[in-house]
Image: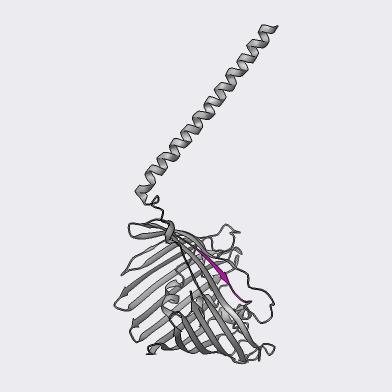
Amino acid sequence: MERCENRKMKSIQIEQNEYWRKVSMKKTVRVLVVAAAIAFIPTFGLAEFKPNTGEIKGYMINEYFYVLSHHDGDIEGRHGFWFRRIFFTYNNQLSDTVRMCLRLEMNSAPDFYTFAVLTPYVKDAYIDFKIAGQHLIAGIQSPPSFAKIEDIWGYRSLEKTPLDLHRWTSSRDFGVSLKGGNTFPYQVMFANGSSNKSETNKGKKLFGALGYEKKGFFIEAMGQYEKTRKETEEYILQGFASYRGEWGRLGLQYAHWNSRPKNTEESFNYNVISAFAVISVGKNLELIGRIDKYFGGGYKTNYSGSEIDYIPFAENAESNFIIGAVSYQVLKNVWLIPNIKLVFYNQPEEGDKPTNNAYINLTLWFKF
């Protein structure tokens, strides 16, 4: 009986030894695989970590506003201070070919009724791989919808560009993009279509833009397609042209948006024509003018204008938006920008023509 027990114990001991030998071998293999991966990483420029290349920067847009007149009588006469935007950005050049960006944004409530504190949220979070002179970017980032237009406009501190302002599409999306080119800059992107929020549907969003840039001239064609979470099919087509010189810059934009709800032949069409001029009249002084014309059946029947941030528009009405401003550069990274914004409405299909809107603002824009 004792011998049987001893044999059983030895058998168990042998099995345990064999088990731990296999575990040890697996660990060894994993270590070797990791070591081999690390050994090959420098080939792709990923092991040359540069801990001292981290950078913190950002900007703030502080504004005093006064609503001189408005189609909503409750808003007319209101005035006060708000932060239209605060950016806080951390960049790091992880290697010669890889960099990352994390950006937080905060805003005052963009309407005249919400009583709330400024709450930060993630605006950008991506990693950028430089491959053969091109950039492969993964994460929350700017799609090509209007990134280049906003850069040339140069005064996001005053107002968003038209597609962003009227919420045709978001300034951010979560996905993968490939961009590059000098004379012919391009960007293609595959994304959730959920902005910087969580993905909640099967549909995805496709973007593509191709431009031409030479001697101050820039032209770009952009298109995007999406099946939304409400299973509405949407596409946007856009053309943009601009010229930049020492005296300033000019820009002209046309865009068309078609939105077709599920299980219907009806579609809503929206159009915008926008033109702007930024003229330098002194070392630290610029004159700014912009006009946007919004038209199409969608604006007459399926448009929630009251949801536009900071400058609510009338519901279901075509509109014309004008900005006039003077920008004075007080210091290297500080601008004081008195400005006026006007909205004029076309006659709607039903009801009375909305009263014109007028805003007088003093905008303080500073970078750090």
Residue 161 shows in this picture: no
Instruction: Please tell me which residue lies in front, 75 or 24.
Output: 24
Residue 107 among magenta residues: yes
Q: Main secondary structure of the magenta part?
A: strand
- Compared to 169, does 62 lie above or below? below
Q: Is residue 255 left or right of residue 114?
A: left
Q: Which residues are magenta?
A: 102-108
Quarter of the image containing the N terminus?
Answer: top right
Residue at figure coordinates x 33%, y 84% from the top left: 246
Residue at figure coordinates x 52%, y 75% from the top left: 164
Q: Is residue 157 left or right of residue 312?
A: left
Residue 47 shows in this picture: yes
> Residue 212's x, y, as percent?
33, 72
Instruction: Please tell me which residue lies in front, 219 or 279.
Output: 279
> Residue 302's x, y, as percent?
61, 77
Residue at figure coordinates x 41%, y 42% from the top left: 37
- Compared to 32, does 312 lie above or below? below
- Compared to 205, does 44 lie above or below? above
> Residue 340's x, y, as percent?
53, 90
Residue lying furthest front: 52
Residue 284 among magenta residues: no
> Residue 318's x, y, as percent?
56, 85
Q: Name the image quarter holding residue 187.
A: bottom left
Q: Name the image quarter holding residue 263.
A: bottom right
Instruction: Please tell me which residue lies in front, 269 or 133.
Output: 133
